[in-house]
Image: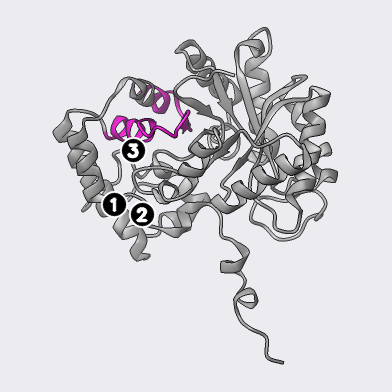
Amino acid sequence: MQVSPLCLGAMMFGAWGEPDHDTSIGIIHRALDAGINFIDTADVYSLGESEVIVGKALAGGRRDDVVLATKFHNPMDVPMGQPGGDPNKRGNSRRWIVTAVEDSLRRLQTDWIDLYQVHRPEPGTDVEETLGALTDLQRQGKIRAFGSSTYPAHEIVEAQWTAERRALGRFVTEQPPYSLLVRGIEKDVLPVAERYGMGVLPWSPLAGGWLSGRYRKDQEVPRSSRSARMPARFDLSDPANQRKLEAADAFAVLAEKAGMPLIHLALAFVLQHPGVTSPIIGPRTMAHLESQLGAADVTLTPEILDAIDEIVPPGVTLSGVDEGYVPPAVREPFLRRRRTA
């Protein structure tokens, strides 16, 4: 499957961002008319509403022209991040996958999904079970290919080895966080993905809005639906977010000197890595989309890339919150403390 240099992310279509379906559909159609042929969504985005909007936008003959990607894993009976809910209505088990894919197909109004992705790892489910269920869906024609999202490098390798040993289909893509402010994957995930010939579809290349040009020192921090939903990524009482603000301001100055918008600098940086296939842009408004479309035509000089490395060195992520996944060994104290009793 051949995809455009930019992928249209649909997370902001629905209650999480733009609640008006007609407005969101207009943004999708504009992106398609501009040459984007790749759309990425997930069942959890606005609890299915994003998929419904994408399905409406592609109805009437546009589905065949689009490489359509969606994801599963997160709870679908309670808002993401809230306690409670049915533990069997989430995760990476065969039981949930065969249910989740039918729900997504119905909402998207399609008979097949081009790329079906595991939204996050689930330590309690063996990757062989996940790969086995996805391989069966692929053989049934319900999905064309499958991939992972926000997987640590060692789990990507384990999944590749498991697929080879068990004669199962394999993850052909990885969707990690990557931006000027979030460069941790340069150390391991990107080299691993290149080693296995995986497509890489970075999410949040504008760092959740930090690289939109609106975050500058000595200015009031703008409010957004994203900052309201994920306050830890924007709280300036956190020293890590202060470092992000200083870096974002330095990148804005660099972009001004280079004669380009910061948005173009940020997207071009991600696009220029040889391991990257198609960064995911996530516009909420038509203006957001228009401001990002031209970035695919920008090439950064070695001098600009060197200046970027001086602001945030290669392999460095300024805030761990932006990595999108905390392994259990870090999250759960009892997993890293020897029991003596």
Circles 1, 2 touching at the beta carbon (< 8 Å): yes
Q: Which residue is mark 1?
A: 313
Q: Which residue is mark 2?
A: 316
Q: Quadrant of the N terminus?
A: top right
Give the side of residue 85 with respect to residue 239, left or right. Answer: right
Badge 2 element: loop
Earlier residue among tags 3 and 2:
3
Between circles 3 and 2, the one closer to the viewer is 2
Q: Residues within 10 Å of mark 2 (few under 14, many from 20)?
A: some
**Residue placed at 40% from the left, 59% from the top?**
235
Residue 135: give x, y in percent of width and height: 78, 33
Q: Which residue is mark 3?
A: 212
Q: Is residue 265 found inside the magenta-colored segment of the image?
A: yes
Residue 156: give x, y in percent of width and height: 60, 46
**In front here: 289 or 325?**
325
Q: How is the image coloured?
A: one colour
**In front here: 244 or 332?**
332
Q: Which amino acid, by three-letter code, is at mark 2?
A: Val
